Amino acid sequence: FITDLNGEKTISLGNIRAPKWTADGKYVIGMEDQDDGRQYTASDIFLVSADGKYKQNLTANTDVIALFPEMSPDGTEIVFNDDKGKVYIMGVLPKN
């Protein structure tokens, strides 16, 4: 959730873990993961607008268990790792 300082305006971003704001403050990136109590069984990286109205799975249709995303300072790349420790860098296209 995102809320104002008074806790009055609450916006749901869904089940986003390890959230990070984009540099422009318009979006949050994070992971939606599943586990069996011992290890991750699935995880995807999502981009969600700060108003909660736009949500995109950035790692859909891959077999990668995508974890712990970070946004580059200039907002052009996202780096994340998988459950085996392999590091991935993903370019980000501007949203029109």
Image: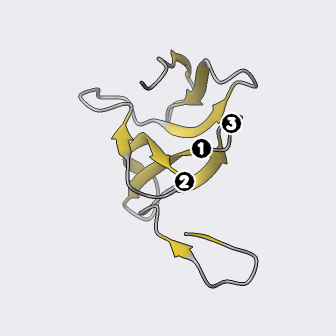
The location of residue 96, given as percent across then percent down, is 42, 24
Q: Secondary structure at mark 2?
A: loop
The residue that mark 1 highlights is 26
How crowded pointer 3 is (Cα within 10 Å; few <14, some 14-19, many 20+) is rated as few
How far apart in space, not on screen, are marks 2 and 1 (Cα)? 5 Å
The quarter of the picture where residue 7 lies is bottom right
Lateral position of residue 74 relative to residue 10, left or right? right
Question: Residue 61 at x, y = what percent?
Answer: 23, 28
Amino acid of disc 1: Lys
Q: Amino acid at mark 3?
A: Asp
CB contact under 8 Å: marks 2 and 1:
yes
Q: Secondary structure at mark 1?
A: loop
Q: Which residue is mark 3?
A: 24
Q: In the picture, which quadrant includes the N terminus?
A: bottom right
- Residue 44: percent from the left, percent from the top? 39, 41
Q: Residue at x 35, y 38 (%)?
A: 57
Q: State the residue lying farthest toward the left.
A: 61
Badge 2 is on which residue?
50
Q: Nearer the viewer, residue 76 or 80?
A: 76
Q: CA distance from mark 1 to mark 3?
A: 6 Å
Do residues under tags 2 and 3 come within 8 Å of each other at their CB atoms? no
Say which element carries label 3: loop
x, y percent for residue 64: 37, 29
Q: How is the image coloured?
A: secondary structure
Of 23 and 79, nearer the camera is: 23
| Image point (46%, 61%), residue name | 13
Three-letter code for the amino acid on which mark 2 is drawn: Ala
In the image, taking residue 42 as reference, residue 47 lies left or right, namely right
Residue at 50% across, 32% down? 82
